[in-house]
Image (tube, grey):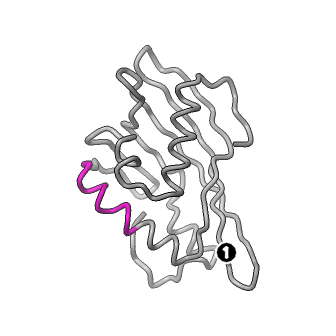
Amino acid sequence: MAKVERLSEAIEVFFREFEKNSNTGDVDRIAAQFADPFMVADPSGSQVVRSNDFKSAIPHRQKLFESLGCRFTTLESIHETKLESQFVMAKTEWRMQFDRGTGTREDVMAWSTFILHTLGEAPKIVFYLRHENIMAVLQKRGILPKETTAGA
């Protein structure tokens, strides 16, 4: 992790685990970090996501990103803002590394904001805001063919 600005230990540990789980594709561990249900939003709109639906989508998303040459995603920075006693906002920056073949690597940066409920055994993501539509970004960069319609 490159930059960490005044993080509480619990939030830092949470996002280090989130990064690890995202890279290994461990469906149960990824889903356990989210509330059931949680809300996700990006420039195209928002939706409520139930745990069972999320669990079935994770392997498909993992396969898609692997097929595009995504080798791993690295958490580059976190900025934490305590909203009140039970909620934290975490603005994050991620680096996705793609193998473009013939030894060529391309990094794609992505920014997300999370609202975490911190009451209980471990924080849970209750709201996940993707600042950009990552599929549109990947199409623009030529990583994702334009005819692919899978969501992420």
Quadrant in which the N terminus is drawn: top right
Q: Is residue 26 left or right of residue 138?
A: left
Q: Main secondary structure of the magenta part?
A: helix
Q: Up-down: is 74 above or below 117?
A: below
Q: Up-down: is 106 above or below 16?
A: below
Q: Quadrant of residue 122?
A: top left
Q: Quadrant of residue 84?
A: top left
**Residue 13: x and y, percent?**
55, 32
Q: Up-down: is 147 above or below 122?
A: below
**Residue 46: x and y, percent?**
35, 50
Q: Nearer the viewer, residue 78 or 47?
A: 78
Q: Nearer the viewer, residue 74 or 107?
A: 74
Q: Identify the residue at horizontal 48%, vertical 26% (top origin).
A: 88
**Residue 105: x and y, percent?**
73, 72
Q: Identify the residue at horizontal 52%, vertical 69% (top origin).
A: 136
Quadrant in which the C terminus is drawn: bottom left
**Residue 55: x and y, percent?**
30, 56
Q: Identify the residue at horizontal 48%, vertical 20% (top origin).
A: 83
Dot 1 corresponds to which residue? 99
The stretch in magenta equals 50-60
Is 135 inside the magenta-drawn segment? no
